[in-house]
Image (cartoon, helix red, strand yellow):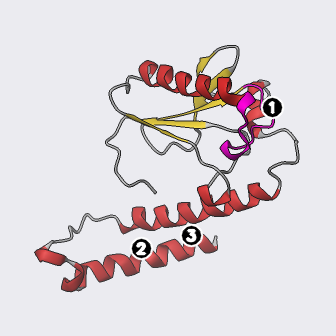
Amino acid sequence: MAATAAAATLAAATSSLLRRTPLLRPHGLRVSHDFAPQRFARHIASSTNEEVAAKTAAATADTGGPTIFDKIIAKEIPSSIVYEDEKVLAFRDINPQAPVHVLVIPKLRDGLTGLDKAEPRHAEILGQLLYAAKVVAEKEGVADGFRVVINNGAEGCQSVYHLHVHVLGGRQMKWPPG
């Protein structure tokens, strides 16, 4: 609730400043009255929440307990499956960051909680994850332009410690990311 109040305050202040301060509008740039500072504030609040979630998840990262992804693999939690084979599962992200946002995971974690835990024995599954990402992009109609992301560790905003690949597409990607 405090994050929501802070976001609302930030939205109001941002909107007010952008409308009233010509110095914040370089080269005569006009800020439309349709400008949605609430979206900007939600983005900041969302980023902060993701960082908190990542730090919280890191505290229990290597306990060996089942992750939410293990429960999705076991079909204990429903998901919208996009692709599946004997080694990997791909399903839609419940908090999409692009029109197409699919997660590709190994069905067997095998100690691969993050990319930093990869060992030579994981080379085959790492390749299969990337190949599956390509297949997902084709199935989702974004093969001409998509992004593959692996978050690693708390500072990389990894919130589930079961290696996973994000496939993002369906909009123009920007550089640099995050």
Disc on the earlier residue, 2 or 3: 3
Quick check: 49 above or below 160?
Answer: below
Mark found first going from the N terminus, 3 or 1: 3
Per the rendering, the mark at residue 4 is: 3
Distance of mark 2 from mark 3, alpha carbons? 10 Å
Residue 101 lies within the magenta run: no
Which residue does the numbered mark 1 point to in the structure image?
110
State yes or no: discs 2 and 3 in contact (Cβ < 8 Å). Answer: no
Observer-nearest residue: 92 or 131?
A: 131
Q: Does residue 11 appear to the left or right of 123 in the view shown? A: left
Residue 40 coordinates in the image, percent (x, y) = 41, 65
Work out whether residue 154 or residue 121 is closer to the camera in this orientation and state it: 121
Using the rendered view, name the quadrant where residue 4 is placed: bottom right
> At label 1, which amino acid type do we have?
Asp
Q: Quadrant of residue 33?
A: bottom left
Looking at the image, the residue that sits furthest to the front is 120
Q: Position of residue 37 (x, y in %)?
A: 37, 68
> How many C-alpha atoms fall within 10 Å of the one at disc 2: few (<14), some, or many (≥20)?
some
List the residue tagged with mark 2: 11
Can you tell which of label 3 and label 1 is closer to the viewer?
Answer: 1
Magenta-colored segment: predominant secondary structure: loop
Residue at (66% x, 42% y) in the render = 115
Residue farthest along the left direction in this orientation:
28
- For label 2, the SS is helix
Q: Residue at x 21, y 85 (%)?
A: 23
Q: Position of residue 159 (x, y in %)?
A: 68, 51
